[in-house]
Structures are given as C-alpha cells and as structure tokens.
Image (cartoon, grey):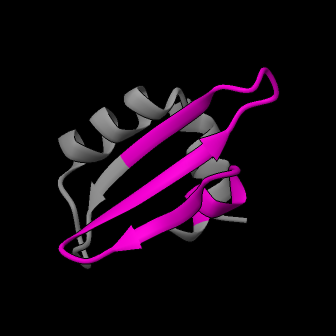
Amino acid sequence: MKALERLGFIVVREGYHIAMIKENPDGTRTPLTMPNHSTIKKSTLRTILTQAKISRNDFLETYYS
C-alpha cells in the first residue's frame, strides 16, 4: 500500500478493502479498491495495477525503493 501512496494514491477508506483515489493532472480521478490482507495473489495485484494504469516496473521500482 505504501508503494501506491508514493505513486500518488491517497487512502479514502480502510476496512476489509482499502479504497484509494488518485487526482490526475487533467482533473480526472482514478479510483482503486484492493483487499486489505497481509498477502494478495499475483493475479489480483496484476489486475489492480492494470486498473490503476501502473506498469509492473513502476510499481516494483517504487515498492523496493
């Protein structure tokens, strides 16, 4: 989750799922909902990154920095 925050997403709500949103430069918003678990499946992470329009490399670079 911290990697997504560093990529510009802010937490809106947290419970069984985490709701996040990103304000884009063109005035639009990118919503994102992800499970609030200690681990998530690779396929779920791939889907989340696709929906958020984040490349795998950008995510991994941010995650490990």
Q: Is residue 44 left or right of residue 10?
A: left
Residue at the image point whose x is 41% and y is 45% from the top: 32
* Residue 60 vs residue 4, the one in the foreground: 4
Residue at the image point whose x is 47% and y is 55% from the top: 20
Q: Please identify the residue farthest to the front as the structure is shown.
A: 27
Q: Please identify the residue farthest to the top as the structure is shown.
A: 26
- Figure label count: 0
Q: Which quadrant holds the C terminus?
A: bottom right
Res 15 quadrant in image: bottom left
The percent position of residue 23, horizontal first and vertical second, equals 69, 40
Q: Is residue 34 left or right of residue 27?
A: left
Q: Please identify the residue farthest to the right as the structure is shown.
A: 25
In the picture shown, does residue 15 fall above or below 20?
A: below
In the picture shown, does residue 47 fall above or below 34?
A: above
Res 26 quadrant in image: top right
The percent position of residue 27, horizontal first and vertical second, equals 74, 26
The percent position of residue 10, horizontal first and vertical second, equals 60, 61
The percent position of residue 63, horizontal first and vertical second, equals 60, 61
Q: What are the residue bounds of the magenta stretch?
A: 3-32
In the picture shown, does residue 21 fall above or below 52?
A: below
Residue at the image point whose x is 31% and y is 46% from the top: 45
* Residue 43 vs residue 48, the one in the foreground: 48
Membership of 5 in magenta stretch:
yes
